[in-house]
Image (cartoon, rainbow, N blue to C red):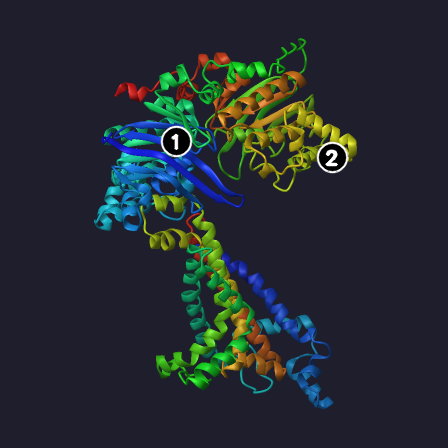
Amino acid sequence: MSEMLLEIDDLHVSFSTRRGLVEAVRGVTLAVEAGEMLGLVGESGSGKSVTGFATTRLLDSAGRVTRGRILFRGQDVTKLRGDDLRQLQGAAMSMIFQNPRAALNPIRAIGLQIADAILTHKRISKDAARAEARELLRAVQIRDPETRMNAYPHELSGGMCQRVMIAIAISCNPALLIADEPTTGLDVTTQKVVMDLLAEIAAARGMATILITHDLGLAARYCRGIAVMERGRIVEEASPRTLFGAPQHAYTRRLVAASPTATSQIEDLVTEEERERHAAVVSRPRQELAHGTPPLLEVRKLAKRFDEGAAAVADFSMTMAGGESVGLVGESGSGKSTTSRMICRLIDPSEGEIVFDGQSIGHVASRDFHRSRFRKDIQMVFQDPNESLNPRFTAFDCIAHPLMRLDGMRGGDALRKRVEDCADRVGLPLDLLPRFPHQLSGGQKARVGIARAIACRPRLLVLDEPTAALDVSVQAVVLQLLDRLRRENDIALLFVSHDLNVVRMLCDRTIVLRNGGIVEQGESRALFDNPKTDYTRKLVEAIPHIETGPVLAAAL
Amino acid sequence: MLSYILRRIASTLPVMAIVALFVFSLLYIAPGDPAVVIAGDQASPEDVERIRQSLGLDRPFLIQFGSWVWRILHGDLGTSIFTNLPVSTMIGQRLGPTLSLMMVTLLLTIVVAVPLGVLAAWKAGSLIDRAIMAFAVFGFSLPVFVVGYVLAYVFALELEWLPVQGYTPLAQGFWPWLQNLILPAIALGCVYIALIARITRATMLEVLQQDYIRTARAKGLGQGGILFVHALKNAAVPIVTVIGIGIALLIGGAVVTESVFAIPGLGRLTIDAILRRDYPVIQGIVLLFSFVYVLVNLMIDVTYTLVDPRIRY
């Protein structure tokens, strides 16, 4: 037992809120060996981040360790105060965070931010600290470290910011690094680069790492041991192979099933027992379209330039048939969101034509499009259900609003019936309708967003990363819902996402974008199984799959 | 950067032109015949006519405005009706005391208010925080002249630590100069300290919630480093803005404060000019204050770019 670097023993953490004490962590016991990489996975609210913050003593002032202890090299971290604590923080133990851009001070040059950490713990001159900072930038593979020293976070990409964070975290050679969702929000390819770098550095320096993530695939790829958390407790701890091959706990089984893999189908995303419970959700096969049916949407040579800069999108052409689902994938900056917004008629294209149902709609200015009769035919579901719902509108108002604006409904029983019907179709319990967004869970909010979008019976639904902010189990349900809606109501889906696994499952066809242009397109399965371009291959290979097993662990 | 400053100066020209038009129109906005207004109640018709002639009030409005602007551009603010001295000379004589008062007040305010705000934000919810905020409400609610008379009574009349009133030029020594300014600066700065302490606290509270503050804590930085190096500079933009807006408050407050403490500054000159309906002097002072205010705004905008590298023009 004494070789353990970190031992968490029966940890309880509570937060005092307006509604009283909330127990976020209830009895976590965990041990980390020196040099080990441990995955801590679970969905939002499972207490995985709180466990990490308690260990590094970075809990909000509202949070308190109420029971248990955290032994780091035999010393109880929860009892440290003042200087003893600061000697630990950033030196023996450090942490990197989700959303690296926000985690860096926006108005301080990154070289100084790294030097801050060094100067806090080492008695060396400022010049020496700067020299060390430069070496660290080189170690995290930032090109041209000399000039980057003076860069500010907003001048760097998200992936670069996370490398700077890693440089700060490793600046004093910690024995333990806690990485809290280090790659959430980054592209798959960037994610791979950052995680490979982190794993390499950890291995080279013999640094133990706790990888906190909601992504089972990511944990499986990089960790030798994985602990699964649910509602403040660890429900299962095993090697990735055992965990995914033969999950013991019901929650783990559900989580494993909900994680999309390279071969999974939409129907696979729930466990056997759940599928039986929801037997009603039988998917009807889609009717084949009669030959020669005109396309629902035709886009020709679409381009968008912002100000005087380079084109965000150039020469983009595509067609979609009614009821078809098309995926639009690419890294951030590839122009996929810009394209989808032009098709939604939220922004105006600089060039090109958009033809919907035989009518040209590209020339209608986006600010006048709400008066077009096609507004209700083209609707959208936005990325973050937490941000895209008006906090002062109840779920009912949210769904009723487009009906009143676009369908000319006046209220009363007819409106109530339509709203309830929409809620029913997306599986939103009717008693939740009077609630405000903050009283709903992430999945429920996503359903409200979808109900709002389908309220006016659109023929084309544009979805911009609709599940990116959701937990995998919620994502699974939302994906099934979208697929069902498409089959039942013949709604065409234009699905914008960076998650290739999801696109492959949901979309008939996929278009790969890079730097505003189409790189490759074709039938989804064929495209992902046999990518024709290097770019697509790189995208596909970067997705962490739970089958691949821990590549780095195996190599060690 | 330089081109930005030049562009900003160019863009203030129309603003100054509109201000000039307003200032000039002061005389005409007041009800009645301007010549009669200036001449006062006891003037004979001949006096009124003489004033009308000498000020050129019989000419069309736009021509009068044009020639007034032309003279100002040549540095001629006109001549006081009451003293027959050039307005620019009169303002020049009174500039020193007012500038001294404003500078000392500004310095005092920043030195007191910002640390108080930071302290309150750091200890948010504690007794210290509540005490500081209670003081802020207090400072807000007390009129300058009340604070002024109370201070003068306690520190000058009773304790005899400081002079009751008056002004000593800086040329006669630093301490005599400062001695006369301490009480007026405290009286004038009260509202201002309260305002800036509150803004500092609110902005700091928001900044302290940010992810990068957590990063700073994760690095093991001490409380001082976190508060002053990482948080305060991020909170600076709103604070600097309010300091700038506050300079307008200071100008208004200086008028009252100078009366209370008998400081022969621009504030006193303003009051005297208003009482004597000395329009050329009023116009000159208002124009000067507007100009200072436009200049301060320019300085604030330039400060933003120094504080925040994301702001580029």
Q: Amino acid at mark 2?
A: Met
On screen, residue B208 versus residue B49, left or right, reads left
Percent of width and height locating residue A125: 22, 50
On screen, residue A75 versus residue B29, left or right, reads left
Q: Is residue A448 above or below residue A297?
A: below
Percent of width and height locating residue B286: 57, 73
Q: Quadrant of the C terminus of chain A?
A: top left
Q: Amino acid at mark 1?
A: Ile
Q: Which residue is disc 1 drawn over?
A: A212
Q: Which residue is disc 2 drawn over?
A: A404
Callout 2–callout 1 Cβ contact below 8 Å: no
Q: Is residue A214 above or below residue B79?
A: above
Q: Is residue A522 above or below residue A79?
A: above
**Toward the viewer: B163 or A254?**
A254
**Toward the viewer: B46 or A504?**
A504
Q: Residues within 10 Å of mark 2 (few under 14, many from 20)?
A: some
Percent of width and height locating residue A314: 52, 28
Write the residue at 42% across / 84% down: B159
Q: Quadrant of the N terminus of chain A?
A: top left
Mark-to-mark CA distance, 2 and 1 = 45 Å
On what subunit does the disc labeled 1 rest?
A
Q: Residues within 10 Å of mark 1 (few under 14, many from 20)?
A: many
